[in-house]
Amino acid sequence: GAVVSQHPSRVICKSGTSVKIECRSLDFQATTMFWYRQFPKQSLMLMATSNEGSKATYEQGVEKDKFLINHASLTLSTLTVTSAHPEDSSFYICSARIGGRAGGNEQFFGPGTRLTVL
Amino acid sequence: KQEVTQIPAALSVPEGENLVLNCSFTDSAIYNLQWFRQDPGKGLTSLLLIQSSQREQTSGRLNASLDKSSGRSTLYIAASQPGDSATYLCAVRPISGGYQKVTFGIGTKLQVIP
């Protein structure tokens, strides 16, 4: 099956710093990637849709200036949490779907990144 | 707005037992429903995907059913093993809106006791 990786798997940072999380599709091209956030004992909530070569689409309530998304290639999307605060501490998960008609209907998820802001 | 509920929130069973996890959704206008497994601190692993036109899907010891009209899906795990211990999530994709509108349940945390 298709593999999606994330880096880093875990990051601890001081309040006010910026953190970049990478999401890569390892064996397929992903025209669209999705960024989710999961708080403890809550369901995954979509933050934004990342489209290769264009601006990301953010869900209601997600600050686009705080969560910068770049999808520079068909295999890489990055999420930068700018000026992180303790309330940004969460589990961030990306997913991707294979582009085109052969892509099917499945989403493939990365292993997640645990962000802790002190 | 679609709401996805999973019952029970947690389940503990002895090894070897067959079990059923439930997922219900409020809007039956779905494109597909997907069951995932999530290990602690890890991402999601897709288990089964059921298209709206399908009634069930099987993979090994797993069987997922879908009753779209009643807004229900079940995940049946046969002969449970300690390695099955994880949180199981169901996710519903609507007919309109694409992946952006996928709604996840909170999950059922399963513990299989050796």
Image (spheres, coloured by chain):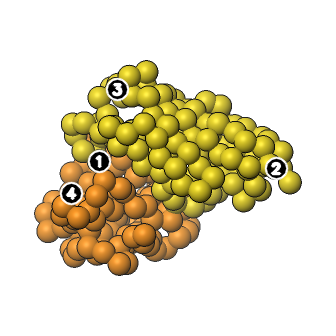
Of the residues shown, which amino acid type is indicated by label 3?
Ser
Return the residue at label 1. Answer: B99
> Of the residues tagged 4 and 3, which is closer to the observer?
3
In this rendering, position of residue A105 left or right of residue A72: right
Which chain is indicated by disc 3?
Answer: B
Residue depicted at x 75% and y 55%: B81
Quarter of the figure that contains the N terminus of chain A = bottom left
Q: Which mark is residue B15?
A: 2
Q: SS of the residue at dot 3?
A: loop
Asked if residue A57 is positioned above or below residue B75 in the image, the reply reads below
The image position of residue A57, as x and y in percent, is: 21, 51
- Quarter placement of the C terminus of chain A: bottom right
Category of crowding for the residue at label 3, using alpha-carbon neighbours closer than 10 angstroms: few (below 14), some (14–19), many (at least 20): some
Which x, y percent locates residue B37?
56, 53
Sequence-wise, the earlier of marks 2 and 1 is 2
Name the residue located 69 percent from the left edge and 39 percent from the top edge.
B19
Q: Residue at x 55, y 35 (%)?
A: B74
Where's residue A50, x and y in %?
25, 60
- The quarter holding residue A45 reads top left
- Gap between marks 3 and 2 measured at Cα: 34 Å
Q: Secondary structure at mark 4?
A: loop
The earlier-in-sequence mark between 3 and 2 is 2
Report if the CB atoms under discs 4 and 1 are less than 8 Å apart: no
According to the picture, the residue beneath numbered tag 3 turns out to be B28
From mark 3 to mark 1, how far is it between C-alphas?
16 Å
Residue A56, numbered circle: 4
Q: Give the CA distance from mark 4 to mark 3.
A: 29 Å
**How many numbered circles are shown?**
4
Q: Colour of chain A?
A: orange
